[in-house]
Image (cartoon, helix red, strand yellow):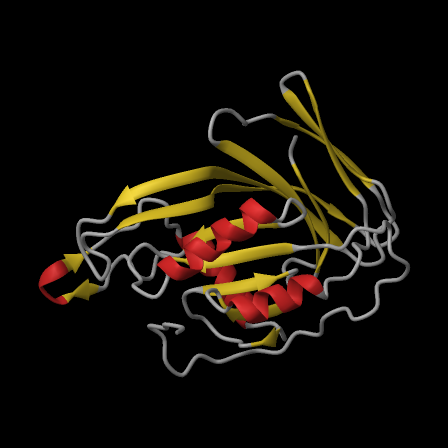
């Protein structure tokens, strides 16, 4: 069941790239972004499903964005719960996705899964998510991330067929929170790959490849991934986890 506190949302149209060219490598591209909130009673099943996908699929890059629009909602006598991992930046990212021509269930709702920047569905819809991940195509650009001392070296090895943005996303591998108010009052929620920071590395013009050096911010219970996305929020062309 998808939940939305918005009504009458206007969905804009943005032309997405449909043909990128020859694949850069054989493996399929599987990036899933889950928009969720600890204040949403429909979200824990999606959180659990994401954890299962991470556990059983080494090739899936999963990122959990906690939106902030649930933070101000009051649930009867249970009161209001502010998600400690929420950010208006992540709500903004979800709204930007709602303005492009994603396949599937468009709009702003939780839990929402966006796969490869192309397809949206309810975040707990196992059948749809597995189908889309199973049908994923090969990446268009090859992304390599290596650790060298205190730095990460990021290389986009293939020439980008369109203007693209390269982004580094940091996350907490696993969190567990005792919810003390709101719709999930009394529930212990486990979240996975909880996004804590999104850092733009650079912009690739059409026909360019790229090399970037960034300080390594890993450690216990921390991870990161690099995403190459057509335009500011178009189809994902390549991605890699940090070592």
Question: Is residue 23 toward the left or the right of residue 126 in the image?
Answer: right
Is 123 drawn above or below residue 64 in the view shown? below
As drawn, the residue found furthest toward the front would be 56
Residue 40 in view in this figure: yes
Q: Quadrant of the N terminus?
A: bottom left
Task: Please state the horizontal and vertical placement of residue 222, each as a whole percent of the image.
Answer: 50, 32
Residue 202: name its quadrant. Answer: top right
Task: Please state the horizontal and vertical placement of residue 24, each as a whole percent of the image.
Answer: 86, 51
**What residue is drawn where x is 40% and y is 73%?**
2
**What residue is drawn where x is 50% and y is 57%?**
34
Residue 16: name its quadrant. Answer: bottom right
Is 86 drawn above or below residue 3 in the view shown? above
Is 6 drawn above or below residue 161 in the view shown? below
Question: Is residue 214 toward the left or the right of residue 78 in the image?
Answer: right
**What residue is drawn where x is 40% and y is 47%?**
191
As drawn, the residue found furthest toward the right would be 22
**What residue is drawn where x is 87% and y is 46%?**
158
Is 66 drawn above or below residue 214 in the view shown? below
Q: Quadrant of the C terminus?
A: top right
């Amino acid at each position: 069941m998808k939940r939305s506190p918005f009504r009458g949302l206007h969905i804009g149209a943005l032309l997405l790239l449909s043909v990128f060219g020859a694949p850069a490598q054989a493996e399929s591209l599987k990036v899933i972004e889950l928009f969720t909130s600890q204040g949403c009673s429909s979200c824990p099943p999606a959180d659990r499903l994401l954890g299962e996908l991470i556990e059983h699929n080494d090739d899936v890059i999963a990122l959990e964005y906690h939106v902030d629009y649930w933070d101000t909602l009051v649930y009867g006598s249970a009161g209001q719960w502010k998600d400690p991992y929420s950010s208006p930046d992540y709500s903004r990212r979800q709204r930007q996705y709602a303005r492009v021509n994603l396949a599937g269930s468009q709009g702003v709702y939780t839990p929402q899964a966006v796969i490869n920047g192309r397809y949206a569905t309810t975040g707990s819809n196992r059948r749809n998510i597995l189908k889309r991940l199973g049908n994923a195509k090969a990446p268009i650009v090859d992304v390599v991330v290596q650790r060298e001392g205190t730095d990460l070296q990021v290389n986009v090895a293939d020439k980008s067929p369109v203007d693209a943005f390269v982004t580094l996303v940091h996350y907490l591998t696993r969190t567990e929170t005792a919810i003390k108010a709101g719709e999930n009052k009394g529930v212990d929620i486990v979240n996975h790959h909880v996004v804590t920071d999104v850092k733009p590395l650079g912009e690739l013009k059409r026909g360019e490849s790229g090399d970037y050096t960034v300080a390594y911010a890993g450690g216990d219970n921390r991870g990161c991934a690099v995403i190459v996305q057509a335009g500011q929020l178009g189809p994902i062309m390549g991605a890699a986890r940090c070592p």
